[in-house]
Amino acid sequence: MSRVYVFDHPLIQHKLTFIRDKNTGTKEFRELVDEVATLMGYEITRDMPLEETTIETPVATCKSNVIAGKKVGLVPILRAGLGMVDGLLKLIPAAKVGHVGLYRDPETLQPVEYYVKLPSDVAERELIVIDPMLATGGSAVAAIAALKKRGARNLKLMCLIAAPEGIKMVQDEHPDVDIYVAAIDEYLNDHGYIVPGLGDAGDRLYGTK
Ligand SMILES: O=P(O)(O)OC[C@H]1O[C@H](OP(=O)(O)OP(=O)(O)O)[C@H](O)[C@@H]1O
Ligand SMILES: O=c1cc[nH]c(=O)[nH]1
Ligand SMILES: [Mg+2]
């Protein structure tokens, strides 16, 4: 069974409140999602291994730590996942970025895949799959399956808001993938929207409603 981590840092929770607020406009929404992605990136990289190197300071020679050359890949689920990419790249600028294009059919709530483009060395990378919303879980499960089909073995899932239903589906289908979120909300409504949630993440990011 995979683990679920809720990032309860006060700055993340504060910004999430304004992301949820229906009176927050597109520009501010996009900026806040970007900022929260950076803050979540700080937390999700906590287990990155370090290795010792030797440097010269202006005063003396010393041993000091650097990130041990672990390769990271970011994989946003299009479209809404794109809103969290730059925030993570600020912390992990060398990460390669793959893309999985999926939309959720509004009638059936089933994910429809329309695009996959990944770094060629996907099997050697630790991949962070990114999507603001984990609702039924169908999109995340399909995206992770698409990555595993292409050789990915080491995956994490990072979302802003998850519904209990989505967490359960990911844990059932991909028990090897830990889940990192800023909040776990109450339930899904009849249209598959997270309650209270934030509405449609893609539409709020890109002003398409
Ligand atoms: O867990 P699920 O029930 O699958 O729902 C979550 C998915 O729905 C949203 O994408 P959407 O289909 O609206 O596409 P978009 O990002 O292009 O707006 C969201 O960004 C997730 O990808
Ligand atoms: O609440 C939800 C559910 C799916 N997709 C969204 O953007 N929001
Ligand atoms: Mg959408």
Image: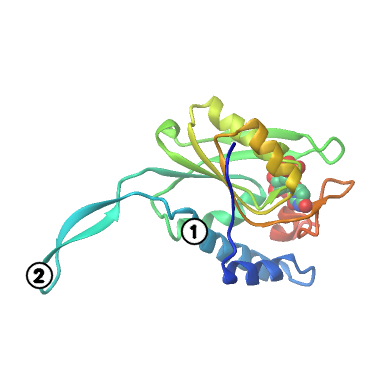
**Number of the label disc, if any, that sits on residue 198:** none
Q: Position of residue 146 (x, y in %)?
A: 59, 30
Quarter location, residue 186: bottom right
Quadrant observed for ligand 1 in the rendered image: top right
Q: Position of residue 176 (x, y in %)?
A: 55, 34
Which of the two discs, 2 and 1, labels the residue nearer the N terminus?
1
Which one is in front, 70 or 34?
Answer: 70
Quarter location, residue 3: top right
Q: Is residue 102 visible?
A: no
Instruction: Give the total of numbered labels.
Output: 2
Residue carrying label 1: 43
Quadrant, the C terminus: bottom right
Q: Position of residue 191 (x, y in %)?
A: 87, 46
Amino acid type, callout 1: Glu
Quadrant, the N terminus: top right
Residue drawn at point x = 52 percent, y = 63 percent: 39
Which one is in front, 157 or 178?
Answer: 178
Q: Position of residue 195 (x, y in %)?
A: 81, 56
Residue carrying label 2: 60
Packing grade of label 2 (10 A; few <14, some 14-19, many >=20) is few
Packing grade of label 1 (10 A; few <14, some 14-19, many >=20) is some
